[in-house]
Structure formats: structure tokens, C-alpha cells
């Protein structure tokens, strides 16, 4: 009876664990990868140069048995793929990942340029998220985690209050799974609708960045209310 009880106790964490491929090993990857691993998910990092000896710190702060491998190897058995990459590199990265059909793609990227007056502007027609969806039509893209600094992802409490992560996507089940990941990082998800509204979220980053340039940095918190 004791053994049977133990099995039942452990089953939920096994059932709900996902294999998550984090594409990239930079700042956003160093925030989201450990954050997802701390929730019991299996995290694998992907790099163009996985043989390099520079990932010790990232792996040390990622729970479980993380490792760094090639792009294709990382996504092969992944349930969720996180594009923690430089926004303008999206097309080349997607080409290197292979077939992503049936997977959830979390897109925290932004595509911006700096105008002559020093302010940042949106640098793509539509959104990077919609571009990603067009490159992986069999996957479910969810825009998320693009509206805040990576340091706040690591430590939301450092913002001094609640932080909202708005998400957009066409697949309700995929958005629900991403919302759970957001909550697991002690932030608050808000579903803002289909993926065609992802450009709004990408432009929210523009407002945030320009406010920071003007010396008024802030974090988004969409305070809920009852109708």
C-alpha cells in the first residue's frame, strides 16, 4: 500500500512535465530556461556552437539534467520550443530547426530599429510572431515574454509589484499551457487574443524601451477588474 501511494503521489509531475527546447543561450534563455526547469520541465538548450566550453553557469542554474546541443537535436523530441534569439535572425534560425509541426513555439522576440532621433521603432510589417507562424504552419505560435527586461523574468519581485505577461495566439490549448508557465514564474498572464494582435505586443516593447530612454522605466501590470 505504501508503494502504491507513492506512485500516485508522483504521477502528476510526470504527466504534466514537458520537454522544452530553448533556442539560444543568451540573456532571455538564461531567464526562461531556468524558470521553466524550476517548474519540473525538462529543458534542453540549443546553440550553433554547442561544443564550446562556455555554458557552465547556465547549466548550473537550470534544474534537472539540462545540456546544450544542436538546433535540430534540441527540437527533435521537444513539446515546446522557445525562440530566445535575436529578432532579426528569426528566418535563419527557423530554417535551421527543421519541421516543428505539432509543437508549441513561444516567441519572445522583438524586431526593432533605432530612428535618427534615437527612439526605437517597430521594424517589420505585421509581427515577428506571424512571420514565425508562416515559417512553421503546423506549429502553434504563442507570443509571450517580449514586453519586459530579462532581469524581471528572473526576479519579478524586484519590480516592486505584480508583472503582467500578455500573450497572443490562435491555439487556445497552447495559450493555456504558456499561461501556466507564466504563473509558474510568479507573473500574471493575460490573453489578448489571436496571433494577428501580436504586433501590438511587439509595439508595447517599443513604448517600454523609449520610456527607459527618457529615464522613466516601467513594467506592465494590467490590473484586472470586474464588469
Image (cartoon, rainbow, N blue to C red):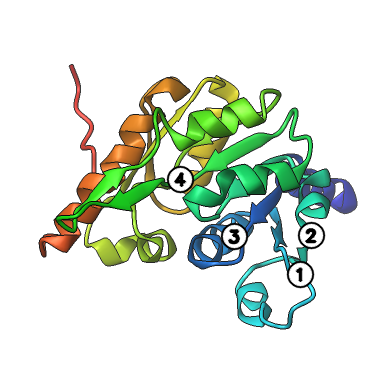
* Inter-mark Cα distance, 1 to 2: 6 Å
* Secondary element type, mark 3: helix
Query: In the depicted view, which residue is nearer to us: 85 or 11?
Result: 85
Disc on the earlier residue, 3 or 1: 3
Viewer-side label of 3, 1: 1
User: Which residue matches tag 2?
Assistant: 70
Disc on the earlier residue, 4 or 3: 3
Q: Position of residue 4 (x, y in %)?
A: 87, 46
User: Which residue matches tag 3?
Assistant: 33
Q: Is 27 on the left or on the right of 67, as rendered?
A: left
CB under 8 Å between discs 3 and 1? no
- Residue located 27% across and 41% down the image: 204
Query: In the depicted view, which residue is nearer to us: 181 or 105?
Result: 105
User: Is residue 164 shown above or below 130?
Assistant: below
* Inter-mark Cα distance, 4 to 3: 15 Å
Q: Which mark is residue 50?
A: 1
User: Which residue matches tag 4?
Assistant: 183
Amino acid at each position: 500500500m505504501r508503494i502504491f501511494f507513492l506512485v500516485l503521489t508522483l504521477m502528476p509531475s510526470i504527466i504534466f512535465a514537458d520537454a522544452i527546447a530553448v533556442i539560444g543561450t543568451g540573456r532571455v534563455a538564461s531567464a526562461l530556461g531556468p524558470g521553466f526547469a524550476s517548474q519540473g520541465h525538462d529543458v534542453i538548450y540549443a546553440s550553433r556552437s554547442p561544443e564550446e566550453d562556455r555554458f557552465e553557469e547556465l547549466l548550473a542554474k537550470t534544474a534537472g539534467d539540462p545540456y546544450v546541443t544542436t538546433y535540430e537535436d534540441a527540437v527533435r523530441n521537444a513539446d515546446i520550443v522557445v525562440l530566445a534569439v535575436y529578432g532579426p535572425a528569426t528566418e535563419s534560425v527557423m530554417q535551421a530547426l527543421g519541421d516543428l509541426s505539432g509543437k508549441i513555439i513561444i516567441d519572445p522576440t522583438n524586431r526593432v530599429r533605432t530612428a535618427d532621433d534615437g527612439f526605437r521603432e517597430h521594424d517589420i510589417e505585421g509581427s515577428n510572431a506571424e512571420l514565425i507562424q508562416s515559417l512553421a504552419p503546423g506549429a502553434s505560435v504563442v507570443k509571450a515574454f517580449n514586453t519586459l527586461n530579462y532581469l524581471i523574468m528572473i526576479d519579478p519581485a524586484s519590480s516592486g509589484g505584480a508583472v503582467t505577461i500578455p500573450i497572443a495566439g490562435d491555439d487556445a490549448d497552447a495559450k493555456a499551457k504558456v499561461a501556466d508557465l507564466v504563473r509558474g514564474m510568479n507573473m500574471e498572464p493575460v490573453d489578448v487574443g489571436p496571433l494577428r494582435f501580436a504586433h501590438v505586443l511587439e509595439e508595447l516593447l517599443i513604448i517600454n524601451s523609449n520610456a527607459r530612454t527618457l529615464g522613466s522605466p516601467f513594467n506592465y501590470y494590467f490590473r484586472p477588474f470586474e464588469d
